[in-house]
Image: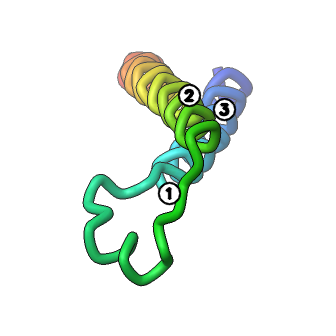
Amino acid sequence: MPTIEFILGLILGLISLGLIVAVLMQPGKDKRLSGAIAGGADTFFAKGKANKWDKHLGVATVAMCIVFFVLILVLYCIVAA
């Protein structure tokens, strides 16, 4: 069983790194002050692309969270048995 534990642990580590990157890439919801400092000049087309990217990033984050949670449970069941 140590091989399965190692492989699942490696996958868990990679997913956790991907989850950290996905969370850090998401924009903040509070853009009042940062928009004033940075200029906040978005064109019509840039707003659409940003919204589409944000939606895909949000879906990827949720999917990685679910896989992370399931892998934790599976790994716990293997180690506890």
Helix, strand or loop for disc 3: helix
Residue tagged by mark 2? Answer: 52
Q: Quadrant of residue 12?
A: top right
Q: For the C terminus, which image quadrant?
A: top left
Distance from disc 1 to disc 3, alpha carbons, whole Å, reads: 20 Å
Frontmost residue, 5 versus 69 = 69
Residue tagged by mark 1? Answer: 24
- Residue shown at 54%/54% (left/top)? 42
Amino acid type assigned to the residue bearing label 3 in the image: Ile
Structural crowding at the residue carrying mark 1, measured as other residues with C-alpha within 10 Å and reported as few (<14), some (14–19) or many (≥20): few
Q: Which mark is residue 11?
A: 3
Which tag, 1 or 3, sits closer to the chain's start? 3
Frontmost residue, 3 versus 28 = 28
Frontmost residue, 1 versus 73 = 73
Task: Let me know if residue 64 appears in the view.
Answer: yes
Which tag, 2 or 1, sits closer to the chain's start? 1
- Residue shown at 52%/63% (left/top)? 41
Against 55, is 42 above or below?
A: below
Helix, strand or loop for disc 2: helix
Q: Picture coordinates of residue 25 (x, y %)?
A: 55, 53
- Residue shown at 26%/61% (left/top)? 30
Q: Picture coordinates of residue 20 (x, y %)?
A: 52, 52
